[in-house]
């Protein structure tokens, strides 16, 4: 064997090794978790594909990406120096409904402000920017004293948190403070926010684009939904947050995301910043059993019942449909999410897995006397709590959904509670009635009446809940509802009399009640206010029971986290809780089943294939023409030679990540997150590199729609696309 051949073989071997390393790096899986920004140094993101200096994600001394990401009901991000925000169509859905009428149906037909003067208020919308965060655990937990009852423990922590928030807001005028529970019973963080209150709609695609596929495609892949909307934040001329005024000027963010018109390609590293809602990965198997067998099936069935009811009423005409559109959207999203979670939990046999893990954990605890003394009763006590909750749930279901689903009862309870709570010192009130929140509470109530209330729907829902209350076992009857049911010859007459004898649907009447004292409210001859008064003790008892349960659970969960970390030999990050988090992954497809592989991009060809001409697949004719003419401008994916619509990536997301910017390795916007796949609905409980995929709208589709469909070239110019 000559030396030249040996050297050639060495070179080839080296090249193969280098190629293998590069392939391995390209396929490096994401880490599970929605990471608090304080934990980013643990991630070594540059080793995993990030080219941006990690300090530019969060560093108060630099124009960090943190300040470009806002909470707008879910998540959004600034994409121009003049406060332009991109988020999801479904995130802005309620505001679009509130701005719509049958004559100016912005929800159905879309909306474009060609000038700043044409931008219209996004009712009920604010934009919240995280300014800073700090650990205040020691101070929160210092409120606990020995021998406190569980309810008093919860109350003491609530009071301490309110004091910390009040002090922080006094020290930072104009800012909003919140203390977030990171690990229950263990760690608490104080977050400081700027809240912008004048938010306006700039561009809303027609429903047939922004909600293409509707609930048929929700939580599914392949997806072809243009789920994006543009809004703008305004402030007073002095730069301070202010309510809507014609004198206000566009907000100038400290930083904004640059848009990458070339988008992402398969295999690219991406990360998301956003405000994910709740995950439950540190809770025990008994919680999974409760969700799997009790709560989620009941909620999913109840939401499905309401959806069918509202859809039936909506056939009366567009004015009635507008009253239901936002409610149906929210109910359907949760209902299908729960169906997916239930299917996923069963498919993975996840409850059995959790119980096996806990059996091994319990063996570990029992093997050591010290561990046994400290942790031996943790899991059995949690089992009992969730078992009791399962038995109580049918009664709880009625009480919770009276307040959640019947708008007039919700209004009556809010008015009565406000009268009672507003008599207390501010820091002792329930949060909704504290001075810092009370104006928003009132505004939400009146806005809900204007946009969501339809009398026949409210009556039908109330009647159904009354029937369910009457079906409860004798020992769990709700006396006030039983008395109400006995007040007439049949339930139809009872419900009819109740709704005819109230003025709580009148905004003027409600506004006249806010300053009244409790005894004055109770003297008013109004059927719903009287019912609220009769049921108020039930809700106070429920509130106190919840405090006691939380006090006990916090103590148990804190110990469970400690012993699980010792058992598994690793540190956990806290479950998502609505605070700013980062998650990362790659643009990649997945295999949902045997012999099935889903590619990570859909294209406009799929829109043509799905279009039927009827909702929810009724593509606007102008868009069909652009697609058929292949008028794709410069926004194609070169690997596909066409316009990409949606994209898949292996990030760890949940509710609240809707609208999160999909950011490339250089810190540029390449898409907007809006959903997960059906298999990934289980993300709230567990995450898998194999099946957890998030779905976003590709930025190239957004830009193409704006330029060629909407004719909004001025917006492309504003975000730097020339």
Image: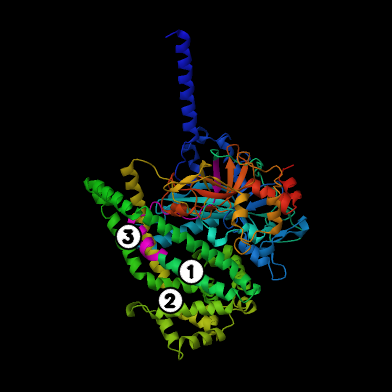
| Image quarter of the N terminus | top left
**Quick check: 144 left or right of 657?**
left
Q: Is residue 552 visible?
A: yes
Q: Is residue 218 above or below residue 653?
A: below
Residue at image coords 50%, 57%: 163
Task: Say which of 685 and 240 sits in front.
Answer: 685
Look at the image and give the residue range highlighted in magenta.
270-296
Measured in 3D between alpha carbons, the distance from the residue under mark 2 to the one under mark 3, in whole angstroms, is 27 Å
Identify the mark at residue 16; answer none if there is no mark.
none
- Between disc 3 and disc 1, the foreground one is 1
**Is residue 271 in the magenta section?**
yes
Disc 2 crowd, CA 10 A, few/some/many (<14, 14-19, 20+): few
Q: Is residue 105 above or below residue 228?
A: below
Q: Is residue 705 visible?
A: no
Residue receiving disc 3 = 147
Q: Position of residue 31 (x, y in %)?
A: 45, 41
Q: Of helix, strand and loop, which one carries label 1?
A: helix
Q: Residue furthest top?
A: 2
Measured in 3D between alpha carbons, the distance from the residue under mark 3 to the one under mark 1, in whole angstroms, is 46 Å
Measured in 3D between alpha carbons, the distance from the residue under mark 1 to the one under mark 2, in whole angstroms, is 30 Å
Residue receiving disc 1 = 304
Among the two numbered marks 1 and 2 on one chain, the one whose residue lies closer to the N terminus: 1
Q: Position of residue 715 (x, y in %)?
A: 73, 49
Quadrant position of residue 379: bottom left
- Between disc 1 and disc 2, the foreground one is 1
Residue receiving disc 2 = 537
Q: Is residue 549 above or below residue 164?
A: below
Disc 1 crowd, CA 10 A, few/some/many (<14, 14-19, 20+): some
């Amino acid at each position: 064997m000559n030396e030249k051949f040996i050297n050639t073989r060495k070179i080839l071997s080296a090249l193969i090794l280098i190629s293998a390393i590069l392939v391995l790096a390209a396929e490096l899986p994401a880490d599970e978790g929605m990471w608090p920004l304080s934990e980013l140094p643990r991630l070594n993101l540059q080793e995993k594909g990030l080219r941006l200096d990690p300090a530019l994600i969060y560093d108060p001394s630099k124009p960090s990406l943190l300040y470009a990401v806002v909470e707008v009901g879910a998540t959004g991000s600034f994409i121009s120096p003049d406060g332009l925000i991109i988020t999801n169509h479904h995130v802005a859905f309620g505001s679009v409904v509130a701005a719509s009428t049958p004559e100016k149906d912005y929800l159905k037909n879309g909306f474009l402000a060609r000038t700043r003067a044409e931008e219209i208020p996004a009712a009920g919308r604010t934009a919240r920017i995280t300014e800073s965060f700090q650990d205040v655990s020691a101070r929160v937990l210092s409120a606990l004293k020995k021998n406190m009852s569980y309810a008093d423990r919860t109350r003491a922590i609530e009071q301490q948190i309110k004091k910390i928030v009040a002090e922080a807001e006094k020290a930072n005028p104009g800012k909003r403070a919140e203390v977030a529970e990171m690990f229950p019973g263990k760690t608490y963080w104080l977050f400081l926010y700027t809240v912008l209150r004048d938010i306006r709609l700039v561009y809303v695609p027609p429903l047939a684009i922004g909600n293409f596929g509707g609930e048929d495609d929700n939580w599914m892949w392949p997806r072809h939904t243009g789920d994006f909307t543009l809004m703008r934040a305004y402030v007073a001329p002095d730069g301070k947050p202010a309510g809507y005024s014609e004198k206000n000027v566009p907000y100038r963010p400290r930083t904004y995301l640059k848009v990458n018109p070339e988008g992402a390609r398969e295999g690219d590293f991406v990360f998301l910043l956003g405000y994910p809602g709740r995950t439950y990965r540190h809770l025990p198997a008994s919680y999974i059993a409760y969700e799997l067998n009790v709560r989620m099936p009941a909620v999913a069935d109840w939401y499905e019942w309401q959806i069918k009811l509202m859809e039936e009423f909506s056939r009366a005409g567009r004015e009635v449909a507008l009253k239901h559109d936002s409610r149906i959207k929210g109910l359907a999203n949760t209902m299908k999410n729960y169906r997916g979670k239930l299917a996923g939990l069963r498919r993975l046999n996840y409850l059995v897995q959790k119980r096996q893990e806990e059996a091994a954990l319990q063996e570990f605890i029992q093997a050591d006397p010290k561990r046994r003394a400290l942790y031996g009763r943790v899991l059995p006590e949690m089992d009992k709590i969730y078992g009791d909750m399962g038995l109580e749930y049918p009664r709880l279901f009625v009480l919770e959904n009276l307040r959640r689903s019947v708008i007039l009862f919700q209004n009556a309870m809010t008015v009565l509670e406000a009268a009672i709570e507003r008599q207390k010192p501010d820091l002792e009130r329930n949060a909704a009635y504290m001075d810092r929140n009370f104006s928003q509470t009132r505004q939400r109530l009146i806005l809900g009446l204007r946009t969501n209330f339809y009398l026949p729907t409210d009556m039908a829902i109330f009647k159904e809940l009354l029937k369910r209350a009457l079906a409860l076992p004798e020992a769990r009857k709700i006396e006030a509802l039983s008395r109400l049911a006995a007040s007439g010859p049949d339930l139809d007459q009872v419900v009819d009399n109740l709704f005819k004898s109230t003025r709580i649907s009148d905004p003027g009447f409600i506004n006249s009640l806010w300053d009244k004292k409790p005894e004055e409210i109770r003297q008013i001859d109004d059927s719903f206010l009287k019912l609220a008064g009769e049921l108020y003790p039930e809700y106070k008892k429920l509130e106190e029971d919840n405090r006691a349960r939380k006090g006990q659970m916090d103590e148990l969960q804190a110990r469970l986290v400690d012993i699980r970390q010792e058992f598994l030999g690793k540190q956990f990050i806290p479950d998502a809780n609505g605070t700013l988090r980062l998650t990362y992954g790659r643009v990649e497809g997945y295999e949902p089943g045997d012999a099935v592989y889903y590619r990570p991009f859909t294209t406009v060809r799929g829109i043509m294939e799905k279009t039927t001409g009827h909702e929810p697949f009724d593509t606007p004719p102008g868009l069909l023409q652009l697609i058929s003419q292949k008028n794709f401008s410069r926004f194609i994916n070169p690997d596909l030679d066409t316009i990409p619509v949606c994209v898949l990536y292996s990030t760890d997301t949940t509710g609240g990540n809707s609208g999160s910017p999909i950011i490339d390795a250089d810190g540029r916007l390449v898409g907007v997150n809006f959903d997960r796949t059906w298999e990934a609905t289980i993300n709230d409980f567990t995450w898998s590199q194999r099946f957890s995929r998030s779905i976003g709208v590709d930025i190239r589709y957004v830009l193409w729609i704006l330029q060629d469909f909407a004719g909004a070239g001025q917006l492309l110019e504003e975000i730097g696309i020339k």
